[in-house]
Amino acid sequence: MNQEDIRTLNELKMLSIDMITHANGGSPGIVLSVAPIVYTLFHRHLNIRPNEPDWINRDRFIATGGEITSILYAALHMAGFPITRDDLLRYRGIKSLTPGFLEHKLTPGIDATTGLNGSGVGIAVGEALAQRFYKNTIEKEDDRLKLIDYTIYCFCSESDMMEGIANEACSFAGVQKLENLVLLYNATNITEDGTLENVLQEDIAKKYQALGFYVDELKDVTNIRDIDKALTAAKKSSKPALIIFRTILGKESFNENKNIIYNRPLTPDDVANLRKKWNLFLPPFEVSKDSMIFFQKNITERTNKKYQKWEEIYQKAESNGNPIVLNAIKALKQKAVMIDFDSDHYKINDNYREPLIESNLKVMNLFGNKTNLFLGGSADYMLSCQTYLNGEEIQSRKSPCGRNIRFGKREHAMGSILNGLALTGLRVYGSTKLVYADYLKSQIRLSALMNLPVTYIFTHDTISVGEEGPAMEAIEQLSMLRTIPNLICYRPGDIIEIMGAWENILKNNHPSVLIITQNNTPKLPGSNAKLVAHGAYIMKQEKNKLDGIIVSSGSELVYALQMSYDFEQLGLDIRVVSVPSLELFLSAGKEYEEKVLPTHVKKIVIEAGNPLLWNRLTEYDNIIGLEEFGYSGHTHEVLKEMGFDYESLKEKVLERLK
C-alpha cells in the first residue's frame, strides 16, 4: 500500500466513525473491519458515475442490513456523489439522505432498500438475473450492442449467511450460473450476541462450492493489493462468486474482537486513540483535499474510459431504432415498464364459466405477448396456480431470455429476487398458494417500501381446498396483506374483475397482490372491469326500496348474488356490492363510499377470511367471516362444518337482515 492509499483509507474510516459518534448509533466494529474492502471496491473496481448516479450500465452495490451504512455514505461522499457534509452530520436523523438503513430512491448511489438480514442477497440475485436478461435481449437483436455488462456486488455478513433467504437465493443463483454476481462476505466470527461458537459451524467455502459458486478466501484483509486481486479473479469467473474476507471486528480499537463494539459507538478515548494511531488531526467530519482528489481521480479515470466506449454503442443503438432494444433501454432508464391493456377490447360470453385461475392465465397472456419485458413464475406451483406465459422458455443460462421463471420451493427468495428484477424496470410477477404469503411477507413489505411494481399472485384462497386440510386453508393471510401500507390487494370475483384488476395494476407503478380462487366461477351479471379501479361498486342494484346491502368479494360473490334473488321471493329488496379491493375503496373518498354504501342502510359482509378489517364498513356483528382454522375433508363437508356453505350463509344473512 502506498502512502496515498493509507491516508485516504484512514480518512474514510475516520469520517465514518465521526458519523457514528455524532449520531450516537451505528456499527463501528463492522466499519473498522470492512473499510479496506469498501475502499478497494470503490477506488479500483466499481464502474460508477457520481454525476450520473442512475447510469444504466453502472455496477450495482447491494449492502444488506444497516451495519455498513455509515462507511458507504462516507465513500459516496468522497467519491463525489451529491451527499454533502451536512448530510453526513444528519446520519440516522429524520428525513435525512443518510438514514440508519439504506433506502432506495432517497440517497443517490443507493441501489436498493435491503431491510432485514439476508434480503439484500436475494435482491442482488434478482439484479444479476435482470442484467443477464437485458444483456441477452439486446444482443440477441444485435450482437454488436455490448450495452449491458455491469457487475452486481453484494456485501453480506454472518447474520445474512444464517438467514434462510440467503441460502435459498444463492442456491437459485448457483443453478442459474449467474456469473455477474460477486458476494463479499465479511467473516468476523462475531455477531451482536457474541462469537459464533454454538451458533454457526458449517464450512461456508465448501457449502458455496457445492451450490455452484466460485469461492476465494482472504485471511489478511489489510492489503489493498490482495483485495484487488481477489475482486479481479471473482469477476473473471464463469460462476457466481463468493469472496470470504476473514476480518477482525473493530480492528485497532480498544475493544477489538469483542461483540461490545458490534453495534455501539466508540468511547471518546477510543476515537482519540484511532486519530492518533492514524495520524489524523483534522476536525471531525473533515477530509483532506488531497484524499478527496486521489479517491475521485481513480474512479473518474477508470469509469470515463468505459463510459466513452459505452456511449458510442449507445448512440448506435439509438440510431438503429430497434424497438426491442429501445424498449429495454427505456425500461432501464425509467425503471418501469408500462403495458397497455384495455379491458373494453375484450368481450366475454355470458355463459362463460371455468376455474378462476384459468381465467387469470388467459388474461395474463392477453397482454403478456405485447412486451418481452413482462416475466415471472412460481415457487414450484406454476401449474397449480396456472401462472405462466404460453410459448415462452424457462429462464436458464441456456435460455437467458426465457420469461417463465421456476423459482423452486423458495418462496422467501422468490420475493427478494422479484424485487431485484423490478429494480431494473422489468414488470414481474410471482405466484404460490395464499397460505405461503406468510413466507413472503417481509419481501412484499420491501416491495411496498420501495414502491416497486411487483405483482404477487396468490391462489387457493379459501377453506374450499378441502382435503388438503387446515394447514393449507388460508384464513388470516388476506387480512395480513391488506394491512401492509402502500400495497393494493385485489380479490376479483370473476374474469371481468380479473381484467379490471390487471388493467389497474398495469396503469400504475405500485406493488399489488392478486387473490385468485381455484373454484369454478361464472361470469357474474353486473360485474364491471372499469369500476375495479374504485375498489368497490354496485354489482346488483335494488329495484325499489333498499332493504339491505350484501357486501362481498372473490368467490363469495356468487353466493351474495344468489341470495339477493332468493330474498326477493321473501319481499326483500337487496343491493349487492362487490369489493375487489378494500384498500382502493377506503381511499376513494366519503362521497363515493356513501353512494355505494349509504350510512342509514344495514350492510352485511361475507368473506371467507378473517373479518377484522371489514369493521371499517359495518358493525362487527354484521361481518360473516372465518375466525378459526378449518378441517380436512371433502370441500362440501368442510364448508358445511365451518358454516360457509350456501344454505348456512343464507340463514346467517337473513337473520341479520331481519
Image (tube, rainbow, N blue to C red):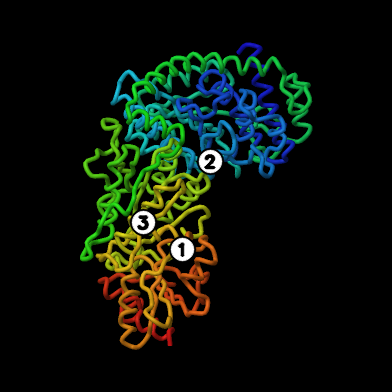
Q: Residue at x 28, y 61 (%)?
A: 518
Q: Which one is nearer the viewer's eye here, 595 or 143?
A: 595
> What is the x, y in percent for residue 504?
40, 52
The span from disc 2 to disc 1 (Cα, nearest Å) is 27 Å
Q: Which one is nearer the viewer's eye here, 234 or 354?
A: 354
The answer to whether marks 3 and 2 mark residues whose Cβ atoms lie closer than 8 Å is: no
Say if residue 478 shows up in the picture. yes
Q: Which numbered disc flags the more N-terminal residue, 3 or 2?
A: 2
Q: Which one is nearer the viewer's eye here, 125 or 512?
A: 512
Q: Which quadrant: the C terminus?
A: bottom left
Q: Which numbered disc flags the more N-terminal residue, 1 or 3?
A: 3
Q: Which numbered disc flags the more N-terminal residue, 2 or 1?
A: 2
Amino acid on which the number 3 mark rests in the picture: Gly
> What is the x, y in percent for residue 423?
46, 38
What is the number of the mark on residue 526?
none
What is the number of the mark on residue 582?
1
> What is the x, y in percent for residue 610?
44, 68
> What is the x, y in percent for residue 106?
59, 38
Compared across the picture, whether 586 is left or right of 404 comes to right
Amino acid on which the number 1 mark rests in the picture: Leu
Q: Which residue is mark 2?
A: 113
Compared across the picture, whether 557 is left or right of 611 comes to left
Q: Residues within 10 Å of mark 1 (few under 14, many from 20)?
A: many
Q: Which residue is mark 3?
A: 500
